[in-house]
Image (tube, helix red, strand yellow):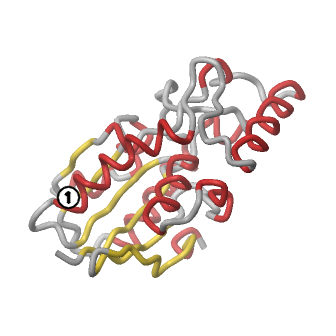
């Protein structure tokens, strides 16, 4: 069946504010700004008749869509929507050493090495594998025409590459502010982005 997906990134956390990496291994809460962003998104989209809300297993996504859940929209958590795990760099200060390490990893990814990862972390290929499973769940769910998906910045970039058949090396083409919206239409077996990086609710 045809579907319309509203894909958003979670609201701001203190680690976001501080520029510190939080991947799959850090289960942080929204800060005051993040809660304000979530409330603004709800105010703008509360009248959309969502059949289902999908989130990652991490509470920053749960907190972002809390108002929709409180209003009674059915909810499912999918680990396939979790953020990429950054391994030994998760929660570390954003110092010169960290900046150099991340620059090196990004260059590997942009060069096509999608198996590159930090120690204890995940590669883009690892994340894509679990995202493909999540996409199948969402795509094949009956009676779910309008769906809200709340996930994470890097994972969202990979997710959008998957949906639109773009190479992973182009993931940086998808900006991802906190609570930014990408609206995606699924029809005829194809996904098409109909709204790109929409943050009008934050104005």
Q: Is residue 161 left or right of residue 94?
A: left
Q: Residue at x 47, y 64 (%)?
A: 40
- Location of residue 16 by image quarter: top right
Q: Is residue 12 left or right of residue 67?
A: right
Q: Residue at x 83, y 34 (%)?
A: 99
Asked if residue 36 is positioned above or below residue 29 in the image, the reply reads: below
Total label count?
Answer: 1
Location of residue 120 in the rendering, given as x and y in whole percent from the top left corner: 57, 18
SS category of the residue bearing label 1: loop
**Front position in the image: 142 or 69:** 142
Q: Residue at x 62, y 36 (%)?
A: 14
Which quarter of the figure is the N terminus placed in?
bottom left
Location of residue 79 in the rendering, given as x and y in whole percent from the top left corner: 34, 37
Location of residue 171 in the rendering, given as x and y in whole percent from the top left corner: 62, 57
Q: Residue at x 37, y 64 (%)?
A: 42
Residue at the outermost front position? 112
Asked if residue 77 is positioned above or below residue 196 in the image, the reply reads: above
**Front position in the image: 49 or 57:** 57
Asked if residue 143 is positioned above or below residue 98 in the image, the reply reads: below
**Front position in the image: 122 or 41:** 122
Asked if residue 35 is positioned above or below residue 139 in the image, the reply reads: above
Location of residue 75 in the rendering, given as x and y in whole percent from the top left corner: 21, 50
Which residue, given by chain and number where applicable, does mark 1 sit on?
71
């Amino acid at each position: 069946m045809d579907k319309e997906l509203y894909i958003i990134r979670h609201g701001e956390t203190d680690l976001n504010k501080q520029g510190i990496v939080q991947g799959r291994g850090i289960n942080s809460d929204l800060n005051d700004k993040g809660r304000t962003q979530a409330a603004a998104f709800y105010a703008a989209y509360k009248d959309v008749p969502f059949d289902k809300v999908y989130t990652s297993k991490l509470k920053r996504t749960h907190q972002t869509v809390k108002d929709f859940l409180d209003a009674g929209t059915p909810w499912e958590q999918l680990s396939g929507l979790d953020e990429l795990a950054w391994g030994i760099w998760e929660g570390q200060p954003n110092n010169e050493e960290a900046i150099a390490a991340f620059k090196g990893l990004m260059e590997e990814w942009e060069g096509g090495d999608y198996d590159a990862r930090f120690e204890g972390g995940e590669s883009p290929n690892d994340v894509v594998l679990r995202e493909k499973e999540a996409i199948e769940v969402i795509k094949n769910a009956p009676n779910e025409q309008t769906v809200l998906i709340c996930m994470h910045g890097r994972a969202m970039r990979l997710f959008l590459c998957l949906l639109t058949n773009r190479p992973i090396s182009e993931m940086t083409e998808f900006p991802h502010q906190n609570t930014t919206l990408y609206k995606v239409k699924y029809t005829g077996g194809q996904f098409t982005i109909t709204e790109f990086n929409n943050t009008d609710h934050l104005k």
